[in-house]
Image: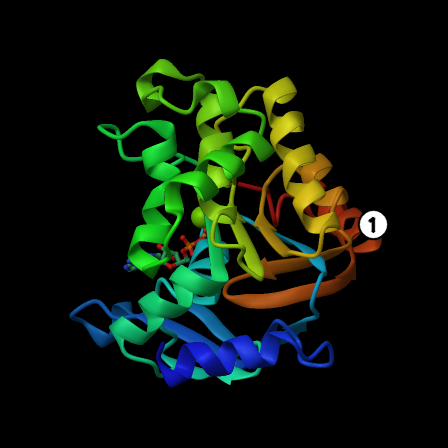
Amino acid sequence: MSEAVAAVGEGASDAAVPTVEVEGLTKVYQAGDPDLAVRALDGLDFRIERGDSVAIVGPSGCGKSTLLHVLGCLDRPTSGRYRLEGQDVANLDEDALARIRNHHIGFVFQSFNLLPRMSAVENVELPLLYAGVSGGRERALSALARVGLADQAHRWPNELSGGQNQRVAIARALVTRPSLLLGDEPTGALDSGTSADVLDLLTTLHDEGTTLVLVTHDIAVARRLRRAIWMRDGRIVDDGPSGPVLDAFIEATAGGADAPA
Ligand code: ADP
Ligand code: MG
């Protein structure tokens, strides 16, 4: 195991160390012409304490997905600091970032992102194979049981409903026992009943100690989380207990400036 991964693990045992701590976090997408550079994240400062649940809301294009990708070590910031469980991860190389992702982060996407030619249990087992963990099949089966799909383990994604596929994706995200679970519109492709089931599952995992961060345009989903961060143009407009932040966000949306997307 690399030093970087070991160090993140050590941080995790210290309750005083926040799961996420960012300072001046900036992401600039550079098109050829410097005038066309997009500051998708424009100097963000915040912490997320261990075990917290956070909704990220804001209009389309404000930087929500970019932020989640950086927090999930799928992408690196252009500048600024990012400490994940006390370990500086902003400047790690691709291999080190991949190890951090495999061991510490679970990611759930709107479109599930399952591999179509693999069964449910094979999809769930994949992160364990990448992480070099033994006993993967058994752990994958028990993760599927946790999301209520023990009897569907050998089905392919095209044989499962949207809600079932998202539960497979959640099983895949939790099978490595990540300290940070990230979702980018995880209920966005689901009907309202299925969406409620998936949300129940995510909040149950959170109740068991996983730090949960969800990007969502669904205010009812956001209200289930303790804290909300409202973004606009790559910056934070408001950040605090979800009730008041979301009330202010809806108020602004009614005025048209921050139509959720
Ligand atoms: P949101 O998820 O809030 O809709 P994004 O994080 O996807 O916003 O995008 C933030 C800004 O960055 C937008 O202006 C978007 O067009 C731009 N952007 C996102 N990804 C890229 C990319 N890969 N290349 C260039 N610009 C991008
Ligand atoms: Mg997005």
What x and y, as percent, mark residue 27? 39, 72
Across and down, in percent, residue 131 comes to: 34, 60
Residue 49 at x, y percent in the picture: 70, 70
* Image quarter of the N terminus: bottom left
| Residue 133 visible in the snapshot | yes
- Residue shown at 22% from the left, 28% from the top: 117
Residue 103 picture quarter: bottom left
Give the residue at x 37% y 57%.
Answer: 133
Give SS at disc 1: helix
Q: Is residue 242 above or below residue 154?
A: below
When the figure is inspected, residue 161 is found, relative to residue 87, above or below; the finding is: above
Label 1: how many residues lie within 10 Å, few (<14), some (14-19) or many (20+)? some
Q: Is residue 57 visible?
A: no
Q: Quadrant of residue 19?
A: bottom right
Q: Residue furthest left?
A: 32
Residue type (three-letter) at the residue carrying disc 1: Gly
